[in-house]
Structures are given as structure tokens and as C-alpha cells.
Image (cartoon, rainbow, N blue to C red):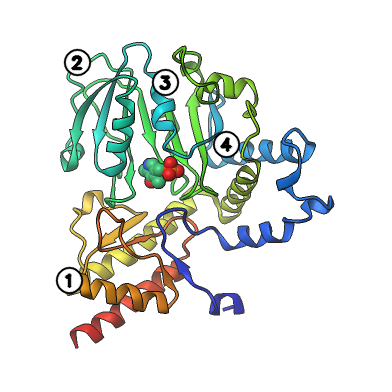
Amino acid sequence: MTADDLNRVYNFCSGPAAMPRPVMQRVQRELTDYQGSGLSIMEVSHRSEFFLQVLEQAEQHLRTLLDLPEHYRILFMQGGASLQFSAVPLNLAQRHKHIGFIDTGYWSKAAQREALRYAKVTCLASGFDAFRQPISTQNLPLDYVHYTPNETIDGIEFHSIPEFDRDVLLVADMSSCILSEPIPIERFGLVYAGAQKNIGPAGLGVVIVREDLLGLAAEVTPRLLNYSTVLEHNNMANTPPTFAIYVAQLVFEWLLEQGGLLEMAHRNKCKAELLYSAIDQSAIFTNNIPQFCRSRMNVPFQLPSEAVTRQFLSLAEQRGLHHLQGHRSAGGIRASIYNAMPERGVQALVDFMREFERQHVG
Ligand SMILES: *Cc1c(COP(=O)(O)O)cnc(C)c1O
């Protein structure tokens, strides 16, 4: 154990979320002097050789991580995941102006609400029913079906890609699960994610789209939301969020060094099992999400009363276990354990939960 480990706190925030420690340290080292230039990456032109290299590396690393076929394109956009709630319908829902949604919680609903401004929306399945498959498309002329593989707030995750009664173009909001395991990308027309959970600084949005879906955007689509326009300008239709892309590039590099997405999948599974088994063995902590759709990334759990919950959260803080409070709409406790959370962080939480339970019950 290094001195750094001894002093360390663990950040369980759902987003903006913990960043890999080595990435933060590298950002710190390079901040005022990027690769011997005497300049910060934050203060150089996006058209400079420096930044162009960062952008190209970011794209290359992400392609390698995802094993992305040539006919999928990568876009670095702004407005996080939420602006994609508008961008996706504007770009992909112009033929039938009709979108199918699977509604499994908070973020599915948010995406659906925004899509309603641009197209007709039909909810094909909701709640736990969405896991009963195949899902009927009701013979509707849908441009695509949208779903949220991991519901960050509700702690619900699809452990496999949903099946339908016919071929559909599938779009996924992967904000809180992207890069946590390999993605069989050819089963999707488009996936998108806000960066703040598993990629980098908040505000950046990453979109991966199949090439043949480009060029169909509505006339009124804002220039910066038009995928074709953004790609024609090599992701520089305006000044891109250069610093955020630089940090994302470092995160991609870190993931490759760790052994890529299969290795992350393995680690994430181990961390989730460790935490869920502690909850299931406990007499006071509970999680009532069915096994088949428990999230590997966001683990909400409860204590018997609000007073005990407050006590738990406050003692946890003192232990350096931060941001365990549940979402403001849900209350309770939530531990977000994305890629950057090491297993020893989850172990520290589990140790603390056992100790709290002994003192509380005993
Ligand atoms: C966090 C989150 C969002 C919102 O991301 P922003 O970057 O705030 O726009 C959308 N969808 C999911 C699944 C999320 O976890």
C-alpha cells in the first residue's frame, strides 16, 4: 500500500463520477506544460498539431477499445447525454417521425419526454415487463427503438440486449455503462453517452453511429446537432471541448493499459457481486431490485429509517466514503461503482457496512 492509498477517500458519486487516479495525476503533471511545449493543452488552438493529435488518439483509442468496425463513426459533441435526447430524434426520426421507447426508469422517461417535441412516441414496454421478451413492436412504422441499458438512478440494468418481434434499429443511451464491458456494436444503429460517468469531464457527449444513418437530419436541426455536419468538420464544427476530449483520451489510454473492456467487465462484475452479497447477507441493508436486472454500476440500497440512513451517511463521510446519498428523487443510499472505482474501494464500503450493522444491531 502506498502513502497515496492510505490517505485516500473513495468517491461513490453517480456523476460527475470518480476519475482514474493515474489519469488525474497525469493531467496534473501536464497541465502547465504539455509534452515539453511550455503550454497547456487548455490554451492552445484546436487546430494546432497538439490538439489534432489528441483528437485523433482519442478516436483511435476508442475504436480499439470497442473494436469498432469502419462503418461506425465517432462524434465528440457537447451538452452531455441530455442534448442527445434532442439530437437523436432530429437526425434519425425523420422518415416516419415515430419512435418506440422502452421505459425502465428516470432516464428513459427523460429521453422520451424530449423526443416528443420532434416525433410521435410509443412506449413498447415499461418497468420490469420490459425484461419479458420478445418485446412487441405493435407493427408500428418506427424509425428506431430507444432504450437505456443501465438506469443510473433506479439501479436497473439489462444484462443482455432486448429482443423484439422483428428487426428494429436500436438506439441506446449508454451514459452510465459505456466502456464497462465490451459492446456488440453491430446490434446498434447508434449509441451515445454523456462523459461524466465512465469517460471524463461532464459536458462532453460521445456518439457512435452507423454511417448509413447519416444525412437524414431534419432541415431545422441546429448545425452543431447535425451528425453529418459535425463529421464533415472532423468534430470541429465549432471549437470543441478540447480539455474534456484530452482527459477522455487519457481515460481511453488508461483503459487500454488495464487490459481493455473484457478486463473491465470482469472487475465490474466482481465489485458488484461483492457489494450485492454484502447487502443480501445483511439484516438491515436491503436492495429490492430482482437479480435479473440489478445494475453492475449503480447500486441503490436502503436502511430501515431515514434517521439511520442519515447516521450511516454521516459516519461514511467521516471514513472517507463519499457521495453515498441516493438520488434526490429516490432517497436512501446509492453506491456508483464505475470503472474508476477500485475493488478496494468497494471492499472499504462493505467493511464499513458490516461494522455499522454490528454497532447498530448490537
Ligand atoms: C447521467 C445520465 C444522463 C444525463 O447526462 P448529462 O451529461 O447530465 O446530460 C442521461 N442518461 C443517463 C443514463 C445518465 O446516467
**Which element carries disc 2, helix, strand or loop?**
loop
- Residues at marks 3 and 4 touching, judged by CB atoms closer than 8 Å: no
In the rendered structure, which disc, 4 or 2, sits on the residue that comes first in sequence? Answer: 4
Find disc 4 in the rendering and name its residue: 63
Q: Say which amino acid is labelled 3.
A: Leu
- Residues at marks 3 and 2 touching, judged by CB atoms closer than 8 Å: no
Find disc 2 in the rendering and name its residue: 139
Q: Report the number of numbered marks.
A: 4
Find disc 3 in the rendering and name its residue: 90
**Which element carries disc 4, helix, strand or loop?**
helix
In the rendered structure, which disc, 2 or 1, sits on the residue that comes first in sequence? Answer: 2
In the rendered structure, which disc, 1 or 3, sits on the residue that comes first in sequence? Answer: 3
Point 53% across, 74% down: residue? 8
Ligand 1's quadrant = top left
- Badge number at residue 305: 1
In the rendered structure, which disc, 3 or 2, sits on the residue that comes first in sequence? Answer: 3
